[in-house]
Image (spheres, rainbow, N blue to C red):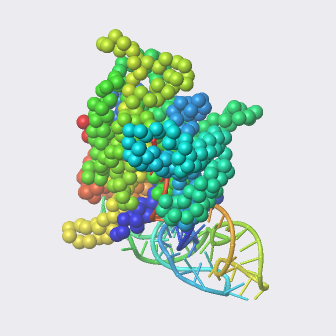
RNA sequence: GCGGGAGUAGCUCAGGGGUAGAGCAUUAGCUUCCCAAGCUAAGGGUCGCGGGUUCGAAUCCCGUUUCCCGCUCCA
């Protein structure tokens, strides 16, 4: 089967079995926004818990917080998002390529500058020791012309950027006759401003001062609470702060199902370390996080690191953990060494001293930060895609048909146990109901009596239910039921009294957490 | 945002100017079977949305929206 088809099938499966629906679907949907259904929200909760427990439960020096989506506007000035997330973009109609308008102009300016440099270089060689650079620049007609042109454009460019004057930027591109390096044409669209942060207003009387953003990442909620947590929790470096929450980005192109959504959930942990020790911890968390992913049991060969060559303005090392989806390897998690960039910035913009007094060194410093930042929705997709299997059902060498099964780790399954009377008579439903009423206090169960037993098993396979118990004619005699395992389709006979205990043991999150170590 | 393709029942799709279709799924009943596809019946769609052409539009035209592919973007 073509891999694209497989991906499509997985998306259909998500909708058909109540995992993921397009947002506001009855109104034709809303681009790049999705809702989690009855099974999807359970699975998502379980993945979230696996992450949270692996961080907060298993590490004495990591604590969790839950910061607000709204933050003081200055946070985004300090973090650099207001600048970095605000790009003037322009398209070339012939090459269909998109560029940042400011970069096109900068490139053009660089080109002029290098022409000037070349003239100077040539003259320097020609005149040797007697070369008077200043005099040459002010008299050579070619250099004078270039310089004048450069200064003119540069001044206009700076002015346009300051005033966010998109029309002037476009005019500069026209005036300088800047061409697309790809197509070589000047067939440009107008410049449009893309702000990747969503804006809204606070308060009933709105003016410019009340404009705030929906956070584009959860990390800043941790940084601005660094002092609060460190002091109130008496945290000693190295220590971490974990958080799970929604973040929002007004993506220009949002595609590939829940891989890139405009509203998404991040699970982030910022780990504060002594300056100079960041690479040690960077490598530690790289390995630690990979092991966490392995814990899903989807196949270790489906994961790989992708080290960043081009680093962000704040980072001195960065890698992604990628997962092999049917559409190729895709980034699920980023591990970044963020240096002291964020805390230093907040120190500067807030005027508050954000430092740690180290008793061993007897001095204070701004801690360095290792960030592990994972997309919950992407992880969800990796789990669904990695668990999805279409297979032939055989019994004693005889082919009985096909089934679709989600091979989810038992602790993650939306429904842990299905309780099925073999037939709808002879008092079997009543017994099954009684078991249901007892077991439902311990974990998610589902009772079903409609259709043949085989068909009910298949329905449970499709949503990843790891266990089914069937009440049959032997049950009234000896208080036993059969338990049927999703993956092997094998069955055992167990006492009704032991159902809770047996299932409880297998669905404990501990089963996953212990895999990490 | 650009280019290409697509949108008909919960799912997969047929129908290309003249009464809205199939298979599977769903619901109810029968059957009582330990691995889907036995029987009977029922429900469900103003054919993505809006406008136009036409006596008549799911079908032709225009716009729009959503999804898919490619480009682009992704600190």
Q: Residue A39: image x %, image y %?
A: 46, 51
Identify the residue at horizontal 27%, vertical 58% (top origin): A489
Quadrant of the image occupied by residue A389: bottom left
Q: Is residue A317 left or right of residue A256?
A: left
- On the question of residue A107 being in view, the answer is no
Q: Residue A484: image x %, image y %?
A: 30, 54
Residue B53 lies, with reference to residue A452, above or below; the image says: below
Residue A40 lies, with reference to residue A10, above or below; the image says: above
Q: Which of A506 and A229 is in front in this view?
A: A229
Identify the residue at horizontal 41%, vertical 44% (top origin): A127
- On the question of residue A54 being in view, the answer is yes
Residue A242 lies, with reference to residue A377, above or below; the image says: above
Q: Which of A439 and A41 is in front in this view?
A: A41
Quadrant position of the N terminus of chain A in the picture: bottom left
Quadrant position of the C terminus of chain A in the picture: top left
Q: In this view, does A453 lie to the left or right of B68?
A: left
Q: Which of B60 and A97 is in front in this view?
A: A97
Q: Residue A273: image x %, image y %?
A: 35, 25
Q: Which of A166 and A402 is in front in this view?
A: A166
Q: Is residue B15 left or right of residue A130?
A: right
Identify the residue at horizontal 76%, vertical 33% (top origin): A205
Q: Residue A304: image x %, image y %?
A: 30, 49
Identify the residue at horizontal 30%, vertical 26% (top origin): A277
Q: Tag count in the figure?
A: 0
């Amino acid at each position: 089967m073509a891999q694209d088809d497989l991906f499509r099938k997985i998306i259909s499966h998500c909708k058909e079995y109540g995992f993921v629906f397009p947002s506001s679907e009855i109104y034709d949907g809303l681009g790049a926004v999705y809702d989690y259904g009855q099974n999807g929200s359970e699975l998502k909760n379980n993945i979230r818990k696996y992450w949270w427990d692996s961080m907060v439960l298993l590490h004495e020096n990591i604590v969790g917080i839950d910061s607000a989506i709204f933050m003081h506007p200055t946070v985004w000035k300090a973090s650099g998002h207001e600048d970095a997330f605000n790009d003037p973009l322009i398209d070339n109609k012939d090459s269909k390529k998109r560029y940042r308008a400011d970069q096109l102009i900068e490139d053009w300016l660089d080109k002029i500058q290098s022409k000037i440099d070349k003239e100077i270089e040539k003259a320097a060689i020609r005149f040797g020791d007697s070369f008077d650079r200043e005099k040459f620049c002010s008299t050579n007609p070619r250099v004078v012309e270039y310089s004048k042109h450069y200064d003119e454009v540069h001044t206009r460019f700076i002015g346009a950027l300051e005033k966010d004057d998109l029309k002037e930027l476009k005019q500069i591109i026209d005036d300088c006759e800047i061409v697309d390096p790809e197509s070589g044409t000047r067939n440009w669209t107008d410049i449009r401003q893309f702000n990747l942060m969503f804006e809204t207003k606070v308060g009933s009387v709105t003016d410019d001062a009340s404009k705030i953003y929906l956070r584009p990442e959860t990390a800043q909620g941790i940084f601005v609470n660094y002092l609060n947590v460190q002091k109130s929790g008496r945290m000693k470096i190295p220590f971490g702060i974990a958080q799970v929450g929604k973040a929002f980005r007004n993506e220009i192109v949002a595609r590939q199902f829940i891989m890139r959504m405009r509203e998404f959930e991040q699970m982030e942990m910022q780990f504060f370390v002594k300056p100079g020790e960041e690479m040690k911890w960077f490598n530690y968390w790289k390995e630690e996080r990979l092991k966490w992913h392995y814990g899903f049991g989807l196949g270790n060969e489906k994961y790989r690191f992708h080290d960043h060559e081009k680093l962000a303005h704040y980072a001195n090392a960065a890698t992604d953990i990628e997962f092999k989806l049917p559409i190729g390897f895709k980034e699920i998690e980023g591990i970044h060494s963020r240096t002291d960039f964020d805390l230093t910035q907040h120190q500067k913009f807030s005027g508050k001293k954000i430092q740690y007094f180290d008793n061993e060194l007897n001095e204070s410093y701004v801690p360095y930060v290792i960030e592990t930042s994972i997309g919950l929705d992407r992880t969800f997709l990796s789990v669904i895609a990695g668990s999805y299997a279409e297979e032939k059902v055989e019994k004693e060498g005889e082919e009985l048909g096909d089934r679709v099964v989600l091979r989810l780790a038992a602790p993650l399954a939306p429904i842990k146990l299905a309780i099925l009377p073999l037939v709808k008579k002879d008092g079997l439903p009543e017994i099954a109901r009684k078991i249901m009423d007892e077991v439902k206090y311990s974990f998610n169960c589902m009772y079903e009596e409609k259709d043949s037993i085989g068909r009910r098993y298949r329905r449970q396979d499709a949503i990843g239910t790891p266990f089914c118990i069937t009440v049959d004619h032997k049950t009234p005699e000896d208080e036993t039921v059969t338990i049927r395992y999703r993956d092997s389709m094998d069955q055992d006979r167990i006492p009704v009294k032991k159902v809770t205990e047996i299932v409880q043991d297998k669905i404990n999150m501990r089963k996953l957490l212990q895999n990490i170590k």
